[in-house]
Image (cartoon, grey):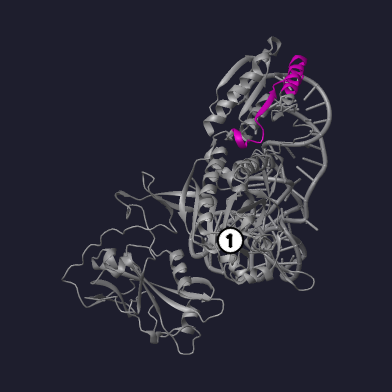
Amino acid sequence: MRVTTSFPLGTIRDTPSEAEIISHQLLLKGGYIRRVNSGIYAYMPLMLRVIERISAIIEKELNNIGCTKLLLPQLHPADLWKKSERWEGYTTGEAIMFNLKDRQGKEFGLAPTHEEVITSIASEIINSYKQLPQCYYQIQTKFRDEIRPRFGLMRSREFIMKDGYSFHSSEEDLTSFYKKIGNAYENIFKSCGLKTVGVEADSGAIGGASSKEFMVTADIGEDSILFTQSGSYAANIEKAVSIPSQPIPITDNISGWLETPQQKTILEICKKNNLDPSQIIKVVVFLATFENKSDIPILACIRGDQHINEVKLFNLIDKLHSSNLLKVKKIEDKIIIEKNLVNFPLGFIGPDLDNETIKADSNWDKKWTRIIDYSASCLSKFVSGGNKINFHKVFQEFSFSSKDYLIEDIRNAKKGDKIKIDDNEILKEKKGIEIGHIFKLGQKYSEKLNAKFSDKDGQLKSLWMGCYGIGVTRIAQAAIEQNHDQKGICWPIQIAPFKVIIIPTNLKDLVQRELTEQIYNDFLINKIDVLLDDRDDRAGVKFKDAELIGIPFQIIIGRDSINKEVELICRTNNTKFKISTDKLLETFISESKIMYNENS
RNA sequence: CGGGGCGUGGCGCAGCUUGGUAGCGCGGGUGCUUUGGGAGCACUAGGUCGCAGGUUCGAAUCCUGUCGCCCCGACCA
């Protein structure tokens, strides 16, 4: 490709003010993407090439393990999503799905994911165990109405994703395929030149028995990963389980009521009353909203030095009730409190708060659901809210063993904690960018959408399913986050838009020009992805652009053209080879092979 | 949704406090010079100052409303 005639670069000199993180800035500066609206980007020619490289790597690995590519619609009828009972949750609860009505008033959603569509199709085409297993995948734009799009392609409202769905006749077969796809994922990310960590994860709104996320570790990551040094354990903080540190025993000389005026936070109480956070039980109030059931108020109790994990809390409440749980939200809003509660001492609540605090005319459940985290349940003497404004209380010999209290794990594991499986190790924490997620769905969707097959025994059974996602555009940006320097992007060669860029320093020089054409054609004939910067600009401009857009190799054609000598420069480590043109191609090929091997 | 910030040529910004009819740098175009690290000089094109009301003789500037975007938080596969 020639920059002047077929491949304009579109680099910009100033960093657009909208970009906060380096990878986003470089994508904009390098002319890879242009913002059209909040969370909506155009993929410019350079970007498209990167997307195509990543897609090709994904396709190769998935085809290798017998997956089949197809393309599904993006406009989904609401009916289908109502069958799986996700319509409400996706349009009113989390409201992540863009939705609209057609001219007849029929409802549609713009697909954030495709379980419903693929399952309904699978139910039509799969009849017998003899057809199983099967795995279909596609690479396509997804739509999600993110609460706050940010960081360019990292969290955008329109993004490209590979999503795959597998169908099995048994749970065992699903499990073995799940492992196979996990291995394929590792190959894919390695082939993309990315360093990733696989972690246990919460399966969230997709649902299912278990799931694993693939993370690119980076400081700007939006997820927290907890892991042990040895690699014996790694999990997303949403899912991670640990053993909390030992509480500091409370001294004997404290008892009864504590007057705690204006002391609403754990830290204030500790400071003013000479207590340790582990001696306090913190009570956080939530409201669980269901699709067709009255709202349920929750008292979530946890040791003061620990934090509530709202994902675990959500999953727990979801498990307790058959109705579809839409959301669990902290009760803070004064209007909501006044409308539904009476004598409600926010900030001074204890685990034994009276059910009478819920107003009779409220449409809430008339009983608090009291959930006690393990960290709190083993304390018998502790300080907690006195259920009276400006008062806390020392609870003595208190027992949570009554059936009013559900003792569960609703706690965030944190760094420094020990884990069950290995006494010697403590958890460390890093930030990560989620670029892949695989789920064992089980029969959740096949049951709801009635996707059955005839098994060996002649019985009709629900299909076992897995689903597997990779954020294609997110990989591209994560790769930049992991591979850049002061000058710009340093693409891993596997996913670079071009392998090499030819930079003639002075096109007015006839010798240079001829040599340039000769080398360019030579590379083209050898099917090497080459970009020729044939702009009539000063050399410096072209050097800067080449570095910014991050092509792995540069060929500089300059003064030594007269001796048939050029320079081959490696972008990443700045290695320079001064070589004669007849050795250029073979040197390039061997050097790029080295680079391929380093990255995989 | 709460808090903060910003909307002025393609990009980055100044001007706004104290109203007087829009400016700088980069980028674009033309010409000459220059040519291995974002060149120099000269000329040039390009903006109803987000939008709508209001105040005023006069509004980018003051007031009201509204829309949009960005950041932090809530929240979020």
Going 42% across and 76% down the picture, which residue do you hit? A298
Q: Is residue A215 left or right of residue A10?
A: left
Q: Is residue A48 left or right of residue A279?
A: right
Badge 1 local density, few (<14 within 10 Å), some, or many (20+)? few
Residue B64 appears in which quarter of the rendering?
bottom right
Residue A333 in picture, x, y percent from top left: 48, 75
Is residue A308 in view from this perspective?
yes
In the rendered image, which residue does mark 1 sit on?
A: A456
Is residue A221 in view from this perspective?
no
Q: Is residue A101 left or right of residue A272?
A: right
Q: Is residue A165 left or right of residue A287?
A: right
Going 30% across and 70% down the picture, which residue do you hit? A377
Among all residues in the image, which is located at the extreme left?
Answer: A253
> Chain ID for label 1?
A
**Which kind of residue does numbered mark 1 sit on?**
Lys
Q: Does dot 1 land on a helix, a strand or a loop?
A: loop
The quarter in which the N terminus of chain A is drawn is top right
Residue A536 in picture, x, y percent from top left: 75, 26
- Camera-side residue: A211 or A29? A211
Among all residues in the image, which is located at the extreme front?
Answer: A457
Count every numbered label the image shows and give the total: 1
Among all residues in the image, which is located at the extreme bottom?
Answer: A360
- Camera-side residue: A326 or A253? A326
Task: Classify A111 as above or below A482.
Answer: below
Magenta part of the chain: A493-522
Task: Classify A448 as above or below A62.
Answer: below
Residue A457 appears in which quarter of the rendering?
bottom right
